[in-house]
Amino acid sequence: MKARRNWIGTSEPIPITRQCELAGAKRSTFYQKPNVFRLDPAEKVLLDLIDQEYTRHPFYGSRRMTQYLRKEGYQVNRKRVQRLMRTLGLAGMTPGPKTSEPHPEHRVYPYLLRGVRFMSSGNSGALLHRRPLRTQHATFAALGSSLSKGTLFKYPETLWR
């Protein structure tokens, strides 16, 4: 678009509207002033400091970066730091959205010890064994170290598929 804007000139005998039509550009692009990014030396220093600190601590966001710059002796507010970080294309590394939602393909396994009462505090580390029977599956919870203390639990077959 910059090249087409250069084709259009005010010193030409053809009107600007016709020149824009011939160049395939809208007339508003000719009148639009280009955005020139100007930095004063103080902002250049701040940009360098932000870049250096972000390299050391990429998880710093605008709030923490503002604290760092104030500790260094610069009078900045958070909005200014946000603008400067946006100019550099920097953002704090935070967890993305929906990180606590399970994946839809994740299989949910049944909790087999729900409702089991333990006789003493040492029995909480129960061993679980699943053994197929003729039509059902049974779960033996061996409380303690011997199977003789175990209790037989029967669950429907659908839990094991």
Image (cartoon, helix red, strand yellow):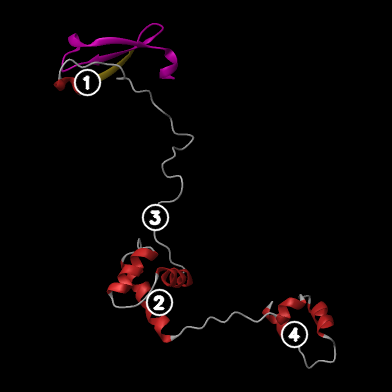
Specify the farthest residue to the bottom: 11
Which range of residues does the magenta coloring cover? 132-161
Residue labelled with disc 2? 47
Q: CA distance from mark 3 to mark 4?
A: 47 Å
Q: Secondary structure at mark 3?
A: loop
Chain-order first, disc 2 or disc 1: 2
Res. 55 in view:
no
Q: Amino acid at mark 4?
A: Trp
Mark 3 or mark 1, earlier in chain: 3
Amino acid type at image mark 1 = Ala
Q: Earlier in the sequence, mark 3 or mark 4?
A: 4
Instruction: Give percent across and percent down for residue 94.
Output: 39, 55
Q: Choose the circle earlier in sequence order: 2 or 4.
A: 4
Give me the C-alpha separation between circle 2 and circle 3: 22 Å
In three-dimensional space, the C-alpha distance between marks 2 and 4, rounded to whole angstroms, equals 36 Å
Query: Dot 3 surroundings within 10 Å: few (below 14), some, or many (20 or more)?
Result: few
> Could you tell me if the residues under marks 2 and 1 are in contact, i.e. CB atoms within 8 Å?
no
156 falls in the magenta region: yes
Residue type for callout 2 = Leu
Q: Disc 4 marks which residue?
A: 7
Which residue is depicted at the point 30% across and 70% down?
A: 68
Q: Position of residue 4 (x, y in %)?
A: 73, 80
Q: Which tag is nearer the camera, tag 3 or tag 1?
A: 3
Residue of label 3: 94
Mark 2–mark 1 Cα distance, whole angstroms, equals 59 Å
| Disc 1 crowd, CA 10 A, few/some/many (<14, 14-19, 20+) | some
Query: Up-down: is 40 above or below 123?
Result: below
- Front in this rendered view, residue 71 or 147: 71
Instruction: Name the quarter where the C terminus is drawn.
Output: top left
Give the residue pinned by disc 1: 126
